Amino acid sequence: MTTAHPTGARESGWLPDCVYTGGRLETGLAFFADPLGRITRFSREPADLAAARRLNGMAALPGMVDTCAHVLARVQRGRTIAGASQAWTPHEVRDVAKMAFVEMLLSGVSCVAAFHRVGADPGELEASAREVMRAAHEVGIRLTLCPVATATLPADAYLRVMEAVRVHVAREHPGDEFWLGAAIDQAGALPADQLKAIGAYAHAQRLRVLVPLASSAREAETCIAQTGRRPFDLLAGQGLVDKRLVAVNASTLSGDEVKALGAARAAVCVCPADAQSDDGPPADLDALQAAGATIAFGSGTMRQGNLLDAARQVPGRMRHPSSAERAARLFAALTVGGARSLGAPSGALEVGRPADFFTVNLYDPSIAGAAPEGLLEAIVFSLERRGVRDVWIGGRQRLAGGRHAQQGPVVARFVEVAQKLGAAD
């Protein structure tokens, strides 16, 4: 893997044709990071421009954040594999996760929250969670690992797994490469005491909590039939509606529930590829954002691996008089909103934040000729994945020339695993 930090270097710098910072694309601006990969300064000084690494024909933008991805579901694209991720070997878990992470990097994603669900065995959940972290480390992507609490896994067993993984992360990865989150399968699927225990643990450890919340009318109706309460009411009753909640899809919320989410400063993660198959209306992103909720995007069950393509499916749900301003809002949700929803250190190219960014070839046929004032709009609505050329995370180059250093072996091994699991089904 190439690195942006030569031996003994105190600072690394980059000079693209333009860089997206402060909500706009700037030209003639270099930016620099310390040996830990944190941005230290921006400069137009001639000496700094000469010292920075020239990224000719490129625009640099902050890495995007995938706020909810079922990374092991990547193996099901184009296949039907029952019980995916159950009874897999550690190598199979790692190989599938690496494929998902490489695909994300290829589209400019630098940070992801893995919605990690396996069978009912706590030992298997802990072991596979470590393999997902190992995959992220080997590929070089930031990760929020979110083991999923299900009705088949008792609360005490789930919390033992969470604590074991938390201790492992603190001991083995003390920086900001990985961090832990909690996830709940469905609000109505867990008894109230289990929700309460998970909420208490998450609050004590300051963890984000990801929950698919009323993603369809059918889900909401089932929850009411089983519990007598709406999914939102179940979460609110156990103290889970706060600034650490990430409500996934949340497409059938009432007006009062939208206001309550906003008042709590919670986040809403929309997974457009998954939402297309739901029977409820699309989430009202304008109302949620106006109420104070943070908007983010996720790839969900990995039906597609390009987060920018996913976000393009919902521009009409973030209304604004001009296309350019819609593009700015969507890109903010893909970056700043995603980072804020997960408590990630990235999301913007600013002093003090990590140098997590991707470059776009300004001469790619999909955006070639775009005027400077229309470039972000062209990138958000028109850029093809081949136009993403490089990805740096924490100042270290993880993608070069549109290719990951491990891409060939990762894809080959993934194909073998997919064929094996499909044959075993």
Image (spheres, rainbow, N blue to C red):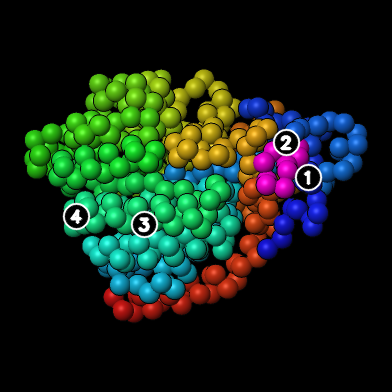
The answer to whether the residues at label 1 and label 2 have Cβ atoms under 8 Å apart is yes
Q: Residue under circle 2?
A: 40
Q: Residue under circle 1?
A: 11
Q: Residue under circle 3?
A: 164
Q: From what the image shows, is residue 190 above or below residue 242?
A: below
The answer for how far apart the CA atoms under marks 3 and 1 are is 36 Å
Count of numbered badges drawn on the protein: 4
Q: Amino acid at mark 1?
A: Glu
User: What secondary structure is marked by label 3?
Assistant: helix
User: What secondary structure is marked by label 4?
Assistant: loop
User: What secondary structure is marked by label 2?
Assistant: strand
Dot 1 or dot 2: first in sequence order is: 1
Q: Which residues are magenta?
A: 31-39
Of residue 95 and residue 390, the one placed in the foreground of this image is 95
Dot 3 or dot 1: first in sequence order is: 1
Frontmost of labels 4 and 3 is 3
Q: Amino acid at mark 3?
A: Ala
Q: Amino acid at mark 4?
A: Pro
Taking the spot 65% from the left edge, 27% from the top edge, the residue there is 22
The answer for how far apart the CA atoms under marks 3 and 2 are is 35 Å
The answer to whether the residues at label 4 and label 1 have Cβ atoms under 8 Å apart is no
Image quadrant where one finds the N terminus: bottom right
Q: Residue under circle 4?
A: 154
Q: Which mark is residue 197?
A: none
Horizontal side of 176 relative to 35 (left or right) equals left
Dot 4 or dot 1: first in sequence order is: 1
Residue 384 visible to an observer of this rendering: no
